[in-house]
Image (cartoon, rainbow, N blue to C red):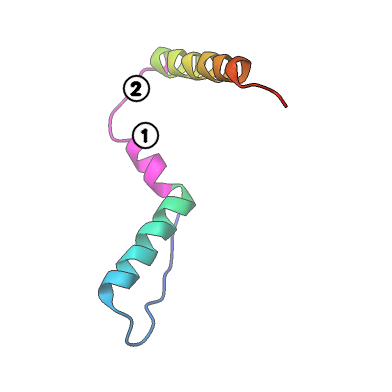
Amino acid sequence: MGLRMRVHDKEPIGQALRRFKKLIERSGMQKELRAHQYYEKPCEQRRRAQLRKQKAARKAMMTPKV
């Protein structure tokens, strides 16, 4: 996946770097890179997904509905 960002004339490098970081974060590339930093067994992936579902269900039960 290729991302392009054009740096404007006379734009400070700090501001361009901030824009670049936001672009990376919004594109989902950073999340994908973190997921691929180390190998995770399929059973561990399923277990984490199940725990996320349980946590979301618990949170939904605790949230008062108006």
Q: Answer yes or no: do the residues labelled 2 and 1 have beta carbons within 8 Å? A: yes
Is 36 magenta? The answer is yes
Please state the horizontal and vertical placement of residue 31, each as a whole percent of the image. 40, 41
Is 50 magenta? The answer is no
The vertical placement of 28 against 56, above or below, is below
Quadrant in the picture for the C terminus? top right
Q: Cα distance, mark 2 to mark 1?
A: 9 Å
Q: Which residues are magenta?
A: 29-42
Please state the horizontal and vertical placement of residue 15, each as a whole percent of the image. 32, 71
- Amino acid type at circle 1 is Ala
The vertical placement of 52 against 5, above or below, is above
Front in this rendered view, residue 56 or 50: 56
Please state the horizontal and vertical placement of residue 23, each as a whole percent of the image. 43, 59
Please state the horizontal and vertical placement of residue 21, each as a whole percent of the image. 35, 58
Q: Give the residue at mark 2.
A: 40
Q: Residue at x 27, y 70 (%)?
A: 14
Quadrant in the picture for the N terminus? bottom left
Label 1: how many residues lie within 10 Å, few (<14), some (14-19) or many (20+)? few
**The image quarter in which residue 35 lies:** top left
Indicate the secondary structure of the residue bearing disc 2.
loop
